Image: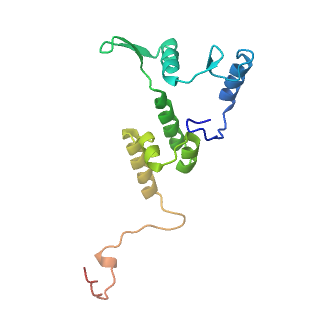
């Protein structure tokens, strides 16, 4: 289930599938949840997330707050997943369906463009311009190749 309670189909790779099967098999007897706190449903992800981050070493002391805080935000992983899907060549509409983004505007906020993306775009453009399309030769038309027939200029409005 998603946070909007709309079911979503997600296909898992073998490693993640095995991990979830193991968690399911080792869950507390009678508990229907894979992720739980002493057999009860986790209703507030913030506390569970902070605890998990601390256990994984993903925390730091925040002097301003006077306590330890997670160095990762839960949605950082969603953002990473969106970026990885797009960089892997998955069509953006498919990536939106997987990540649960219903609007393009929100999806675009997760699909952050960085300097490396811009460099890769420049490399791809240069490669494209260096290799002519299938069987066609690209040429630049100059004054010498232009037609000698005078054509009236279109009026500008």
Q: Residue at x 44, y 50 (%)?
A: 124
Q: Position of residue 105 (x, y in %)?
A: 43, 48
Q: Quadrant of residue 135?
A: bottom right
Number of marks drawn: 0
For image coordinates 67% across by 27% down, the residue present is 15
Classify residue 3 as left or right of residue 60: right
According to the image, what is the colour scheme of the structure? Answer: rainbow
In percent of width and height, residue 97 lies at 58, 45
Q: Is 17 or 138 nearer to us in this picture?
A: 17
128 or 41, which lies in front? Answer: 41
Classify the position of the N terminus by image quarter: top right
Q: Quadrant for the C terminus, please.
A: bottom left
Q: Is residue 73 visible?
A: yes
Viewer can see residue 89: no
Residue 139, position in %: x, y? 40, 69
The residue at the point 45 percent across, 56 percent down is 128
Q: Is residue 102 positioned above or below 39 on the image? A: below
On the image, which quarter does residue 155 sit in? bottom left
Residue 143 image offset from top left, x and y in percent: 29, 76
| Rendered position, 122 above or below 142 | above
Residue closest to the eye, 122 or 147: 122
Q: Is residue 157 above or below residue 129?
A: below
- Above or below, 119 against 46 in this view is below
Q: Residue at x 43, y 67 (%)?
A: 138
50 relative to 66 in the view: left or right? right
């Amino acid at each position: 289930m998603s946070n909007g309670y709309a079911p979503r189909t997600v296909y898992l790779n073998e490693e993640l599938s095995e991990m979830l099967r193991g968690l399911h098999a080792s869950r507390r007897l009678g508990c229907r949840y894979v992720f739980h706190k002493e057999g009860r449903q986790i209703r507030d992800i913030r506390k569970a997330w902070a605890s998990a981050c601390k256990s994984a070493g993903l925390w730091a002391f925040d002097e301003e707050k006077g306590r330890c805080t997670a160095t990762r935000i839960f949605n950082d992983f969603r953002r990473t997943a969106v970026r990885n899907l797009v960089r892997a060549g998955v069509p953006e509409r498919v990536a939106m369906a997987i990540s649960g983004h219903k609007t393009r505007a929100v999806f675009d906020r997760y699909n952050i463009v960085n300097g490396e993306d811009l460099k890769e775009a420049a490399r791809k453009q240069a490669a494209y311009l260096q290799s002519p399309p299938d069987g066609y030769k690209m040429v630049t038309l100059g004054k010498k190749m232009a037609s000698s027939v005078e054509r009236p200029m279109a009026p500008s409005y």
